[in-house]
Amino acid sequence: METLASLQEQVTALQENLAIVIRGKEKCLEVLTIALLAGGDVLMEDVPGVGKTTLAKALAKSIDLSYNRVQFTPDLLPADILGSSIYNPVTGKFEFHKGPIFCNILLADEINRASPRTQSALLEAMSERQTTIEGVLHPLAQPFLVIATQNPVEYHGTYPLPEAQLDRFLIQLKLGYPASEVELDVLYDQAQTHPLTTLQPVLQRDQLLAMQEAVRAVRVERTVGAYIIALVERTRRDERLKLGASPRASLMLFRAAQSAAFVAGRDYVLPDDVQRMARYVLPHRLMLTSKAKYGGQSKGDVINEILDTVAVPA
């Protein structure tokens, strides 16, 4: 049985490995690690070229797990992700051929370029870690993680993700542009070869599963749990929102706070952990009213105001 200290050393090793490829984004790398240890799926939304796909590939290469990438396009079909039965003329029978979803880490690249029908193929997998194909239930590998990237919906050729799909992502992460000094370093880092080509795994499957189990054992006082519920309920009563956070959001914020505490080196959750992760777990699940949207309000503004007004437990 590995100690808490040794597990956290492995967390540090993972973040340092990711930092070889993604420079100057330590906070983003930490949040991505928190999502991984919480067992939740990640949606990375930003403009093209800031490193969304590179970060997802770096995470996959840093862990010794099976990894598949699907490039989402308008003509992609659900069977292209899940798999399908193909007739074998030799045996005279239909044989099921697994799709790329049967792996540990699935990179859904530019997920909002596919039609809603194709996007929905991931719903059951993300929620229940299983998929039903032609009436047959197929459990997915453990651990299983979806990392989806998307460009903002105002860009041409994209489809906004439905609310049911967004609600299944644990966090939404935005990388943003790098600082000028960091971008200069990136130019010279990739002058000869890309750092991703030499990246080596620093975690094994059993180590990751052990860390995810340790996260679930992190203590959450009932007052902190009540604080989570108070934050979520406030989103349901806010006049600026026509859709508040769901009970699934409460569960995911609970798990994200546990993971944040674990990464911080603690076996108990503080209200600070809840406040920090609420900014990543809640906004993408909300829907602004037209009045709030065109009045210059953002979902992040709403969450920040709620965090400022809801009483924090002592």
Image (cartoon, rainbow, N blue to C red):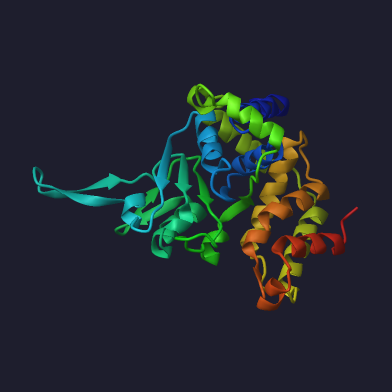
- Residue 22 lies left or right of residue 122; in this view the side is right
Instruction: Let me know if residue 241 appears in the view.
Output: no
- Locate the N terminus by quadrant: top right
Q: Say which residue appears at 52% left-offset and 61% top-offset.
A: 165
- Say if 229 sits above or below 289 in the image: above
Q: Nearer the viewer, residue 131 or 216?
A: 131
- Residue 274 lies left or right of residue 246; in this view the side is right
Where residue 233 appears, as percent x and y from the top left, is: 74, 68
Residue 186 picture quarter = top right
- Say if 168 sits above or below 191 in the image: below
Q: Nearer the viewer, residue 142 or 177?
A: 177
Q: Nearer the viewer, residue 213 or 145?
A: 145
Residue 75 picture quarter = bottom left
Q: Say which residue appears at 48% left-offset and 57% top-offset.
A: 112
Q: Say which residue appears at 62% left-offset and 38% top-offset.
A: 213
Q: Say which residue appears at 42% left-offset and 45% top-offset.
A: 140
Q: Nearer the viewer, residue 129 or 47?
A: 47
- Residue 134 lies left or right of residue 245; in this view the side is left
- Say if 217 sits above or below 190 in the image: below
